[in-house]
């Protein structure tokens, strides 16, 4: 089905992003998978090509256009070549809104130019060993000390955790009240005494993505490390999580389309019992059903992106998009791997990596069970 989401400017941007991916990313991704992390220089190269901070005002070095479709183009092109190690989506789609909406002028001048040039890599640290879905119960805490703060605690599963130079950390600042009303956000910078990194975690997929534990041992923070308002951190998070979920959905549908494309090609060329395997009615029906569902997911998602650009995407809509598209992605991954037979289980076949990389999509950004909770609450239940 013809997509009507993008115009000629997005297409031109896509051409340049695609050329960048083919030239600077595809040839190196296998090497990064072995290393468990991408080289920082690819971030700087991406910065030069205008692929970081497209919605950051030009005065800070950004693209100056607030249009999520540009973010979606970058996310889609990353998935098109299966370059799941690049944490650009986390940086552009998830962290940028916090910096743009909550920073003071001085903070913007300090961080945004590096954010856009790729010299300052970012992360957001919400999850802890004992608090993932139950974010209100984070144990990491910050207490006031003189005119600043002292931060103590630990985080886990943090995307870009090893490479990050600036981390937005979710901490409790009101142990008396606790829960959602006692949460604040802090900007923690590389090199601050007491800020340490643990292991680059060994995952089943997203092999080139650095996902790490972070430790804060009495880290002294200046007063302006606080992002937004004290004890309103939970609200700041809730306001920005829909874009995070939309970003995950963009990757999900792009991945489903890619896996279908890979599998259609395989079904046309692999023969068994004297004919291409796609000619067996079972396989044809499986692919027909998946193609139908992916097309429906695509139309819903594109409408979500449109509404998000108009400021109309609700929390429930974003949760539906994340839930539906990531479940579909996993369904497509499993069926497509199956259709590759034994070759689907071999790492040299891209479908095998797409299958493992898909799994986490139903887990992070709020698990799909939590998405159902959100949607259910939206129904007044
Ligand atoms: C590769 C990767 C990258 C990640 N990147 C980041 C990152 O950059 N920053 C960050 O902060 N976090 C990140 N995470 C963490 C991720 O967001 C959490 O893993 C996720 O929110 C789930 O939390 P948990 O792992 O503690 O699971 P738990 O919260 O312990 O949940 C365990 C199970 O119980 C279910 N469950 C929990 N509560 C309910 C409920 N109320 N109703 C029904 N079922 C429920 C869950 O759905 C899940 O199936 C990442 C995780 C991974 C794997």
Image (cartoon, rainbow, N blue to C red):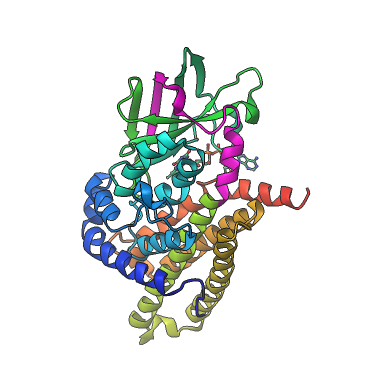
- Report whether 33 appears left or right of 59: left
**Farthest residue, direction top:** 146
List x then y, in percent, for residue 259: 41, 68
User: Can you see residue 324?
Assistant: no
- Report whether 353 appears left or right of 137: left
Residue 356 lies, with reference to residue 213, above or below; the image says: below
Q: Which residues are magenta?
A: 213-242
**Farthest residue, direction bottom:** 274
List x then y, in percent, for residue 65: 44, 58
**Farthest residue, direction right:** 380
- Report whether 202 appears left or right of 181: left
Q: Which residue is located at x 44 percent, y 85 percent?
A: 279
Q: How many marks?
A: 0
Q: Is residue 299 magenta?
A: no
Q: Quadrant of residue 121?
A: top left
List x then y, in percent, for residue 115: 35, 44
Q: Which residue is located at x 22 percent, y 48 percent?
A: 41
Of residues 265 and 51, which is closer to you in this image?
51
Residue 329 lies, with reference to residue 362, above or below; the image says: below
Q: Quadrant of residue 261?
A: bottom left
Q: Which residue is located at x 46 percent, y 83 percent?
A: 280
Q: Is residue 235 magenta?
A: yes
List x then y, in percent, for residue 113: 33, 44
User: Can you see residue 164?
Assistant: yes
Of residues 288 and 378, which is closer to you in this image?
378
């Amino acid at each position: 089905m013809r997509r009507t989401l993008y115009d000629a400017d997005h297409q031109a941007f896509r051409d340049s992003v695609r050329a960048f991916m083919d030239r600077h990313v595809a040839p190196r991704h296998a090497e990064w998978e072995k290393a468990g992390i991408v080289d920082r220089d690819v971030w700087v190269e991406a910065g030069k090509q205008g692929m970081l901070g497209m919605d950051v005002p030009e005065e800070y070095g950004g693209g100056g256009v607030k249009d999520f479709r540009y973010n979606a183009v970058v996310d889609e092109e990353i998935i098109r070549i299966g370059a799941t190690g690049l944490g650009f989506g986390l940086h552009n789609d998830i962290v940028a809104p916090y910096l743009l909406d909550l920073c003071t002028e001085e903070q913007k001048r300090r961080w945004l130019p590096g954010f856009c040039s790729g010299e300052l890599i970012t992360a957001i640290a919400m999850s802890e060993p004992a608090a993932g879905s139950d974010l209100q119960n984070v144990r990491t805490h910050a207490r006031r000390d003189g005119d600043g703060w002292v931060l103590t605690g630990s985080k886990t599963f943090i995307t870009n955790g090893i490479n990050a130079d600036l981390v937005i950390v979710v901490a409790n600042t009101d142990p008396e009240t606790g829960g959602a009303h006692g949460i604040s956000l802090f900007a923690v910078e590389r090199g601050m005494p007491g800020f340490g990194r643990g292991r680059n975690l060994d995952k089943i997929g997203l092999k080139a993505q650095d996902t790490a534990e972070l430790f804060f041992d009495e880290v002294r923070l200046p007063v302006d490390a606080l992002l937004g308002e004290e004890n309103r951190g939970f609200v700041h998070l809730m306001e920005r999580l829909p874009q995070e979920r939309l970003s995950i959905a963009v990757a999900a549908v792009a991945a489903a389309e890619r896996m279908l494309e890979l599998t259609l090609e395989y079904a046309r060329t692999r023969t068994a019992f004297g004919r291409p395997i796609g000619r067996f009615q079972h396989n044809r029906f499986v692919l027909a059903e998946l193609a139908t569902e992916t097309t429906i997911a695509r139309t819903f998602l594109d409408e979500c992106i449109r509404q998000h650009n108009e400021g109309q995407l609700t929390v429930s809509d974003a949760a539906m998009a994340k839930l539906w598209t990531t479940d579909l992605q996993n369904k497509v991954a499993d069926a497509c791997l199956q259709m590759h037979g034994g070759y689907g289980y071999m790492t040299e076949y891209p479908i095998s990596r797409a299958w493992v990389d898909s799994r986490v999509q139903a887990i992070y950004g709020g698990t799909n069970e939590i998405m159902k909770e959100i949607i259910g609450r939206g129904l007044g239940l």
